Amino acid sequence: MRPEVLNDLFAEVQSLEGVGPKLKKPLDRLGLTRLRDVIYHLPMRFVQRRSVSDVDQAVEGEQIVVALTPTEHRSPFSGRGPYRVLAQDNAGNLIALTFFGKASYTAKKTLPVGEKRWVAGKLERYGDMLQIVHPDHVATDSAGLVGHLVEPVYALAEGLTQPRILSMAEQALVKAPELAEWIEPSVLAQQKWPAWRDALHLAHRGENEPARDRLAYDELFANALALTLVRQSNRKRRGQALAGDGRFRDRLQLPFPLTGAQRRSIAEIAGDMAQDAPMLRLLQGDVGAGKTVVALEAMLLAVEGGAQAALLAPTEILARQHYETLRRMLAPTGVEIALLTGRDKGRPREATLMGLLDGSIPLVVGTHAIFQDAVQYRNLGLVVIDEQHRFGVGQRLLLTQKGRVTPHTLAMTATPIPRTLVLAQYGEMDVSRLDEMPPGRQPIDTRVVSAQRLADVVAGVERHVASGQQAYWVCPMVRDHESEDIAAAEQRYASLKDRFGDRVVLVHGQLAPELKDAAMERFASGAASLLVATTVIEVGVDVPNATLMVIEQAERFGLAQLHQLRGRVGRGSEKSTCLLLRGEELSETGRERLALMRETQDGFLLAEEDLRLRGGGELLGTRQSGESAFNVATLEQAARLGQMANDDARMLVDADADLASPRGQAARVLLYLMERDYGVSLLRGG
């Protein structure tokens, strides 16, 4: 049960004044559905304004507050131009206050001729005249603008304004209760951090670094604490020790010998599975490092030990691809494998369910359908989760309740993660790293091309497709609005369709699953030659015949994302190419990023560099995977504060396993506040 003290914060956002049904859609888009979400919707930056007595004291481009007296209102001649209010400052300088569209109605009311007003906005020049376009604030006296000298700027969605979000934040902060302290007192004193409620107020009012660090630490600490409790609970559970005799694994005919990293990882997994305590291990491997082979060895080890194994994939297409790959590899061993997805119906489904129940089917691959109530196993000993970041810790816990005893869990991810961030994301797991590439994989030829050569690139794609090969075309991240990403993709798709006809298909995050699957299926089968996609969707398909990847406005992406996308080609024996189309205005960071992509294909190195270059920003390219573990903590904060949060969480659980002490009780409240309450549910009397 959520503690009563938090009830106000979990109230619907509609309970705030001025928030009606009209705002529901834009607020949902920002994930602001409760007051708790609003208080953690921190400003992206702050506008700093300077109060000046006249514009001679200011410089062009500066944000100012100045007293002005309107002298004349000028309507546009044609009815289509801007509406201008000419005004004088104390020194007699003439300034234009410029308004577009409906804003002119406000100007008529708020800026009467001959009456002094205090105006806040950005001083700019238009021709010979200084101007302020759409003043941010107009007040009848200077006191009215004192609070606007430092002003927060929030992320918005269409239909929302800065004043509206600010009003919501101010109302929500009033409802934030005083909470007992959950941070270790010595950490609090050493870091000079404010109390939780004070930190929230400070973070919304100005760029207060200690306040922001405190809030980021709360999030990292809650995550670490929940994962520590998962791990502790896992250790107490009874699993089954599984040891293999090699009778199936020895018969495998692999396309190439195992790398040292694969052999090391298999030995670590075998060591874990031989224990009574259920394994919780993460297999981190770069794109193409051979994770599937390691997973297969682990699954066969379970079968040799008398148990069953299940592989869970995030999408139906990936499940089918894994099934085909594993079926081919298993052929010499005689071990049967089944596929089970939500689409399977009738007799074939019944036969699979019976086989899993009586144990005659030892291996199964599928989507989350393999964990529905109707699916029962004779003895499930190992669960392999592919693209693990798609499944939250809560879902992982549900999967492990399918066996007679808790099955071993092997999670896999193809996102190389910097060591400093592994703990934050997967603190409850042991980690194996595949940091070597199998022999024989050809490097991908990566080139940076100016967007001005777009016509040449399209012609190159046409030649490529005409030769019988396939290509991907990834559209740019426009802004933080997914709808704009989709619009950009649809535009590019329309222009390419004129050239390529039905040979081009489009995939984006808001397509109905069956349409998305159908488009992917056409591409995977070779019926379509060109796949246009946004980045919101991870193009998790293995198409060896696709040997060209075009990424538009590549400078806008993080390195981790660029690397993931590039990894979609280079999967067959043919030489592959990745074209990074760049805009004209490249920042220093953008330039460095693209240079690194050209120079190296080591995902782990790129992940470390990504962290160094980005500092802040979203965690681990999560924008493409659709879920981030953190709202407040930036990459830089997770790297800097993560270890401290993990150590603190472990110390607390070691000293107070049931979180029953005063600090333990405060930490329980934090787990509910941060929605990591699956951690509390594992405690006795949680």
Image (cartoon, rainbow, N blue to C red):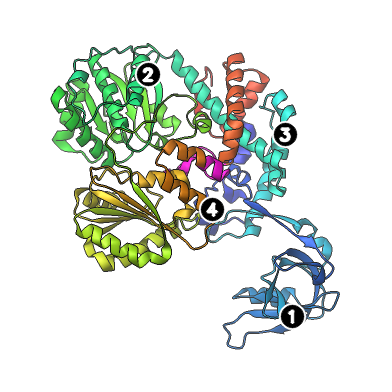
Mark 2 crowd level (few <14, some 14–19, many ≥20, 10 Å Cα): some
Residue 166: percent from the left, percent from the top?
66, 54
The CA distance from mark 2 to mark 3 is 41 Å
The CA distance from mark 4 to mark 2 is 46 Å
Disc 4 + disc 3, Cβ < 8 Å: no
Residue 590: percent from the left, percent from the top?
51, 53
Q: Earlier in the sequence, mark 1 or mark 2?
A: 1
Give the magenta part as a residue range: 610-631
Horizontal side, residue 111 vs residue 418: left or right: right
According to the picture, the residue beneath numbered tag 1 turns out to be 86
According to the picture, the residue beneath numbered tag 2 turns out to be 268
The residue type indicated by label 4 comes to: Leu
Closer to the observer: label 4 or label 3? Answer: 3
The CA distance from mark 3 to mark 1 is 48 Å
> Taking the image as drawn, is residue 427 in sight?
yes
Question: Residue at coordinates 59% horizontally, 82% vertically from top-left?
Answer: 81
Q: Earlier in the sequence, mark 4 or mark 2?
A: 4
The CA distance from mark 1 to mark 2 is 75 Å
Q: Nearer the viewer, residue 82 or 298?
A: 298
Furthest-front residue in view? 599
Closer to the observer: label 4 or label 2? Answer: 2
Q: Quadrant of residue 76?
A: bottom right
Disc 1 + disc 2, Cβ < 8 Å: no
Q: Is residue 670 above or below residue 379?
A: below
Residue 251: percent from the left, percent from the top?
17, 21
Residue 438: percent from the left, percent from the top?
30, 32
Q: Quadrant of residue 210?
A: top right
Q: Earlier in the sequence, mark 2 or mark 3?
A: 3
In the picture, the disc for residue 27 is 4
Disc 1 + disc 4, Cβ < 8 Å: no
Q: Is residue 196 above or below residue 590?
A: above
Horizontal side, residue 399 vs residue 421: left or right: left
